[in-house]
Image: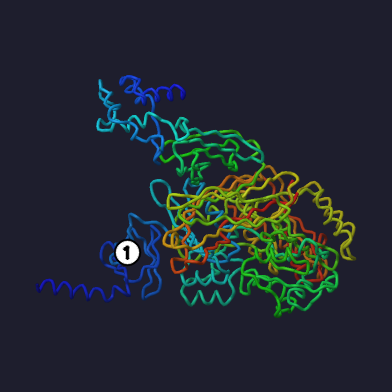
Amino acid sequence: MSRYLTNTAFAVWLGVATPALADGLSVVIVPPFPTAPTQSLDTSILNDAQLAQFTMTAPLPQDLDTSVAEVVGRQSNISNFGTACGPSMTMNAAIDAMLVVNIFAPCLPYDMIRFEHEGLSFTVPMPMTGELTMLLPALSESADVHAHLSDGTTLSASTDVPDAVNFARVALQWSGADPGELVAKAPKVLDGSVVHLGQSMDADGAVLHVFSSRIDEVTSGGVVRFSMRAPVTSENCAVEHETRVRRRVPGEPVSAYDMTLKGPGCEAVGESLELKNVLQDLKLSRN
Amino acid sequence: MQLIWRSILAALLMCTPVFANDVRLTSRDGAIQIEGTLLTYDGEFFRVETIYGPLTLDGEGVTCDGPGCPDLNAFVPNVRFSGTNRMAEVLIPALIHAFAARNDLSVTREVENDRKSTFVLGDKERLHARFELSSSTTAEGYADLITEESDIALVLREPRQSEVSLARSAAAGDLLKGRRARVVALDGVVAITAPGQPVRSISLEQLAAAFSGATERWSGLGGPDLPIVRHLPEPESGLMDAFEDRVLEPNERIISDGATHHELLQDLADAVAEDTFAIGLTTLSEIGNAVPLRIAGTCGFETNATLDALRAEDYPLTLPLMLYTPARRLPLIAREFLEFTQDPTADIVIRRAGFVDQAITQTRFDDQGDRLAHAISQAGPEVSLEDLQRMIEALRDRDRLSTTFRFTGGTRLDIQSEENIIRLARALETGAFNGRDLLLVGFSDGEGPAGSNLALSEKRAGTVLRLLKESAPDADFSRFTLSLAAFGEALPMACDDTEWGRAVNRRVEVWVK
């Protein structure tokens, strides 16, 4: 399909294809229009002479005022690197109940992508190449991940992660500018760590911190203390912190809830907000 | 123009009393008017501070005027909890979440700081309630209840005499009248050490000496010749109060300077876990990575703070976690929440939160070898072989229920046992023991002549039977057997040479087949 599209788009660009075909294509393709300006769509090369070759035999189904250059640009659907724009996502289960998520959206370099997994979300900036690979701890045995792109496209993928039942995972989503962090204090014998995901630059962003520890017969007991810590900055002092918690521990029902944290206010800029008693500690019984 | 001036004047005159009395409640026929400051409105009833003291008026029967009047249509009940952080940190939030989930409500927790949060319960259509939670101490919980700054107190002990009289003078009602305390969960006061500490058991007398500072080295407790580093909770906390009442005072000890006091028990547990010299006082729910010490008696009994021992109150330092309600009406959703905390479905929530629930569990006769071995080794001239054989005969084909009744002295039940009466009565009413044979078995301590001890243990079993029958009016007593037995001092649970040991021994057990 994509090769067909690429060929067709090329044909249109070169002015080979008939306008009727181009007309038909605009219905077939719903191409994501890049938000960032891309070199390949330099309309200056589309000179008037070339454009004049198009004669409209039928009106475009979209806005008639849409400049022809834009239509052509949109239909070209080619990234900086000559690849098709069509965004895609793949996801596989990896060792330790992690998910390898790969996003390919070459026409959306530097885009802010919002990932969503089990009701929690975080935002990740796309690199210049428009390709992103990351590791995400699975929060469920049948994991669904959705990626929302800035052009409105939503990509979804799902995979089974049977090993996820062997992990205790406490996830904290922290939204807004200058988000705080999940702090876990675990005894050395416990194999646990916090995975930090995402970047949050503004009110629309969110980060996700996931404490993960394998729980099985050989696990030694212990208590993991959780606390929440956020810097008080001029960016976040005036607003409430929106957070969401999801706790998934073997032998316990999953719990998920929202929390709103009132900061100490803007006179405390430079200090930090620390909450030690809000998240329930993780108690692992000694076998 | 004159009209305007008049209106302003009238408004000004009106305003003066408005500051003092923000509501005026008028009966439907207009005959009675009550002015005052609105304390609470629970969706059904107004509670107003008046010159006559606080009054509760049915919202149906009055109309409300004044700036303090609530918006009756958009009314969202606000339930305020205040008291010990032992309950406010984990237990109550867990119960609120479970309560909301059972009622298909979502919860958003608004966190003001580590000590103050509000749980907003609602669904897509509307807000159902706000549960405000203040985390401090048992004493502050009672104080807030008395000053009507809270609706439900979270407490670790019953009110002290000073608090009862304060409540009386503040017209907050008699704090002890009626059944105001509900035991929600159980915890235990435990002494902890680092995992490497060789001393593993300690008597209450040694505990008092070690924490007060009188015993300065581990060698005084049978350990190596190293200093004891003491870690204690904040003075005035409910846990410290309980420890003072039950361990320090009976042993005439007071805490000397030099101990480290921790505001948070988790910090205390962490500090102890990392220091082999340290001994810490905490609760079973908050031992962290430290290890609890067993409580030993001089005659060889040792009790571990286990789930079963706490439920049966066989462990001497059981700490009931209670909700204390005032002598006034609470909003419907608050009453529903209180009801929920007593429901068997809340038991699992309580256990997951790290506390001991009051579920009725059974222990087989075969698993109680330790107790029987002690009974035989402790049998004195007053407990004959026949007495022991008679007891074994009565109990050997039965299981012991975790439900055990203990007495504060004479035949008055302690608070945990009062709760046990209600729990067992409810189980009888719901038919949980239909077709079974329940035996209430009275025991006594070993002080005094065996004959009178036997009579006393019989009397205690009789008291429990009477209370059970009173508390279970809907139970069909023909569907199960409920009988009495008494064996005096024949099966001690602890040593009789201390007051706490004797208190543990004065009990009524329930055995079932």
State left or right for residue B408 relative to residue B57: right
How many numbered discs sit on the rendered protein?
A: 1
Query: Which image quarter holds the C terminus of chain B?
Result: top right
Q: Amino acid at mark 1?
A: Cys
Above or below residue A252? Residue B409 is below
Above or below residue B18? Residue B439 is above
Q: x%, y% of residue A88?
A: 49, 32
Looking at this view, is B48 or B91 the one in front?
A: B91
Q: x%, y% of residue A142?
A: 58, 35
Q: x%, y% of residue A240?
A: 44, 58
Q: Residue at x 70, y 61 (%)?
A: B287
Query: Which image quarter holds the N terminus of chain B?
Result: bottom left
Q: Residues within 10 Å of mark 1 (few under 14, many from 20)?
A: some
User: Where, by quadrant of the figure, is residue B319 drawn?
Assistant: bottom right
User: Where, by quadrant of the figure, is residue B460 drawn?
Assistant: bottom right
Residue under numbered circle 1 = B69
Looking at this view, is B186 or B161 the one in front?
A: B186
Above or below residue B368? Residue B319 is below
Q: Secondary structure at mark 1?
A: loop
User: Where, by quadrant of the figure, is residue B293 drawn?
Assistant: bottom right
Q: Is residue A5 visible to us here?
A: yes
State left or right for residue B106 relative to residue B213: left
State left or right for residue B99 relative to residue B257: left
Q: Residue furthest left?
A: B1
Chain where mark 1 sits: B
Q: x%, y% of residue B143?
A: 52, 72
